[in-house]
Image (cartoon, rainbow, N blue to C red):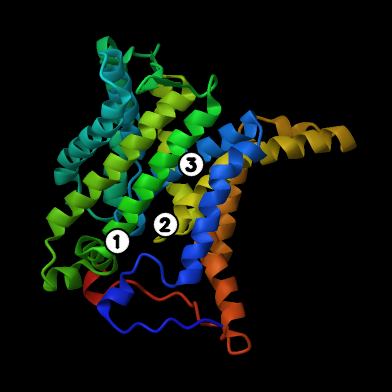
Amino acid sequence: MRFVFKRSYDDDIKLFKHRPQAFYYLALLILMLALPLLLDDFFLGEVTYVLIFAIAGMGLMLLTGHTGQVSLGHAAFLALGAYLNAIMLSKGIPFVITLPLAGILTGIIGMIIALPVLRLHGIYLAIATLAISVLADDIIVMAEPFTGGVTGLVAPPIDIFGLDIDRYGTPILFYFLVLFVTLFVLMIYRNIMRSPLGRAFVAMRDSEISAQALGVNITKTKATAFAISCAITGLAGALLGHFAGAFNNETFNIVLSIQLLLMIVIGGLGSIHGAFFGAMVVGFLPQFIAITRDFATDNFGFNSLSMPGIETGVFALILVLFILFEPMGIYGRWVKIRTYFELFPFYRKNMFKRQKSYLKTERMK
């Protein structure tokens, strides 16, 4: 049983709670670096796909999980990052410049869009961001001279200081590139949440009125959260464009926006871990269904699992089950299991009972 005694404010914002936790993450990092030696190219590609979705999940988690602003339009910013990166690469700009620049430009455009949209709350904000995702599909088609319209674009090859990186030609190098970007985004995210800005995000999520009373500029903080969220999502979109190889307006449809939101809900809202757990569900679920279908076909002659839309149906079923039985997501379940063993035999059954997260003055918003 481990107790963490905090003697100062610095103890509360440390990167790791204690040394064993730092050791656990170091061991996980070593495992990720050794994965190319343990997996073949196919499964390494699946892990790469999961990492790209984890980056997009962290972008949405910052906005929805830590700031409380629901967005159903993040597929539009994935598309923006992918198209900006591909267009700049086609103009001869090096990848080491186009990748961060795609994220920065996506963040700036996201902040401009956020200024009128973030005046809304709750379901109205969700509908407004959903409209952004719908409009993005039409804008991509209308901007055919730049985006290729329905034909789409082919992601130019990646060249980093003379080193050619391709998903199919050099999958190991592409994996390490995505891993590096994931770690970079993770460190930025973690440090933001340790800063006063991150504390303002959480305060605004829990109660906008209380946060405003404490001196938080609500409009400025929302716009900043939206800008950072879109910038991270733009980075994921740029990498997703290279992972897909070729993409068009249908690659970043409205279903992807909904999938991103459901992903962080299943993983666990309000936790960086939840973005990774949710990405693993999204990334590995199709492979699990394919393996199950092959097993059922070979052993029982049951081939109805190949019906179209089964992945979406299973994903929706998983979401419903989590909402009913584990609203805190996969990470919430892990926290409960860990706390049970840490406090045994003093664990209380109602320790994680859900509380209302709003004030009486906010019920009519």
- SS of the residue under disc 3: helix
Amino acid at circle 2: Ile
Q: Nearer the viewer, residue 278 or 302?
A: 278
Identity of the residue drawn at 22% across and 44% down: 227
Identity of the residue drawn at 55% across and 60% down: 330
Question: Horizontally, is 265 left or right of 88 in the view?
Answer: right
* Position above or below: 264 against 3: above
Q: Which residue is mark 3?
A: 51
> Residue 272's mark?
2
* Position above or below: 44 against 14: above
Q: Nearer the viewer, residue 30 or 104?
A: 30
* Alpha carbons under labels 1 and 2: distance apart: 10 Å
Percent from the top left, x then y, of residue 135? Answer: 28, 29
Q: Nearer the viewer, residue 174 or 272?
A: 174
Percent from the top left, x then y, of residue 318? Answer: 59, 52
Q: Earlier in the sequence, mark 2 or mark 3?
A: 3
Disc 1 + disc 2, Cβ < 8 Å: yes
Which part of the image, by quadrant, shows the N terminus? bottom right
Q: Earlier in the sequence, mark 1 or mark 2?
A: 1
* Alpha carbons under labels 3 and 1: distance apart: 21 Å
Percent from the top left, x then y, of residue 237? Answer: 37, 32
Identity of the residue drawn at 76% across and 36% down: 293
- SS of the residue under disc 1: helix
> Residue 139's mark?
none
The answer to whether one can see residue 175 in this image is yes
Which part of the image, by quadrant, shows the C terminus? bottom left
Q: Which residue is mark 1?
A: 193
Amino acid at circle 1: Met
